[in-house]
Image: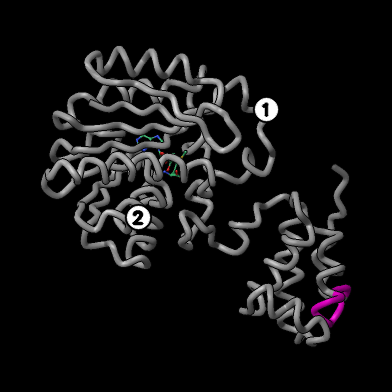
Amino acid sequence: MPVTRPHPETTMAEVPRTVGEALRWAARQVRAPQPRLAAEVLLAHVLGLSRASLLAHPERALTEAEAAAFARLVARSAQGEPLFYLIGEREFYGMPFKVTPAVLIPRPETEHLVDAALEWARSRAYRHYGPLCFADIGTGSGCIAVALAVYLPNSHGYATDLSEEALAVARENAARHGVSHRLTFLQGDLCTPLPEPVDLLVANLPYVARTEWEALDPAIRNYEPTLALDGGADGLEVIQCFLAQAPRVLRPMGAVFLEIGAGQGAAVTALARAAFPRAVVRLLQDAAGLDRIVAITH
Ligand SMILES: C[S@@+](CC[C@H](N)C(=O)[O-])C[C@H]1O[C@@H](n2cnc3c(N)ncnc32)[C@H](O)[C@@H]1O
């Protein structure tokens, strides 16, 4: 897609000085699937206003500082930087999450993982077990762990990641949503930092195969952390290690919900059956009908 790349020196002078004109100008520069929407989100972020109030007041004048800040973000977007890193936030499960380039931007598909885990946890509660203990392996921004802790008030969770920088973001997100006291963040490889077995394991681990790397959207490949994406030669290396560790850290009658790539259903189901020969292993689809979650229940 041909993209206009504004020169950083000239852009500021070019930014029109009303909201309406600035939005039209920016929509021609930004690199995003919905350029007008991206322009609105960026300008709303700079002005600290809602998109609705921007649209209601297209005649509002921009100050020099506002125009300059907007021009800088538009220029970065024109270079391909993802919108959610530019504004530092992404909504997940109805809640805002801080995101930085140290963490994967939470994806809507991953909300299905939370749905499936919550459904299992709630059905378990009807069987009158005690407080639930869960672990989110490869927590990144903490979006899965925080959503589970918010929606399962009678729970405690562990969240692990190799990246200390990601864990710092996840801790902030837990604090923002008032669940820090029920989440423990642990640095280390997959399940190895867990101090005790858990009832519920959830994981969205890297699953991009090396052969798929070049075909990845450059906005993902160039900006999101390689550690969050790279699943090794066949995309299954990290998932395979996780499934090898999981039986040792899952309590009897526990469950595992694992996000997978759309073409990995058969391979991961086979790995899951080998790791948990007595469990029920199911493949769940996302809203687009693609295989997205491997569910292991007892
Ligand atoms: C695909 S991202 C998912 C992040 C978040 N759970 C989400 O759904 O948005 C995978 C995460 O796993 C972490 N990770 C990769 N390899 C790991 C390993 N061996 N042990 C622990 N975490 C790992 C990455 O740092 C990254 O944060």
Instruction: Name which residue lies at 72% across and 60% down.
Output: 38
Q: Quadrant of ligand 1?
A: top left
Q: Residues within 10 Å of mark 1 (few under 14, many from 20)?
A: few
Instruction: Name which residue lies at 54% across and 58% down.
Output: 90
On residue 144, the disc is none
| Residue 242 falls in image quadrant | top left
Question: Is 261 displayed left or right of 142 in the figure?
Answer: right
Q: Residues within 10 Å of mark 2 (few under 14, many from 20)?
A: many
Residue 39 is at least partly visible in this image: yes
Q: Earlier in the sequence, mark 2 or mark 1?
A: 2
Look at the image and give the residue range highlighted in magenta.
14-21
Q: Which residue is mark 1?
A: 214
Residue 165 is at least partly visible in this image: no
Residue 175 at what x, y percent from top left?
Answer: 33, 66
Circle 2: residue type: Val
Find out if the beta carbon at label 2 lies less than 8 Å from the nearest ligand 1 atom: no
Q: Which residue is mark 2?
A: 146
Question: Is 60 displayed left or right of 124 in the figure?
Answer: right
Q: Secondary structure at mark 2?
A: helix
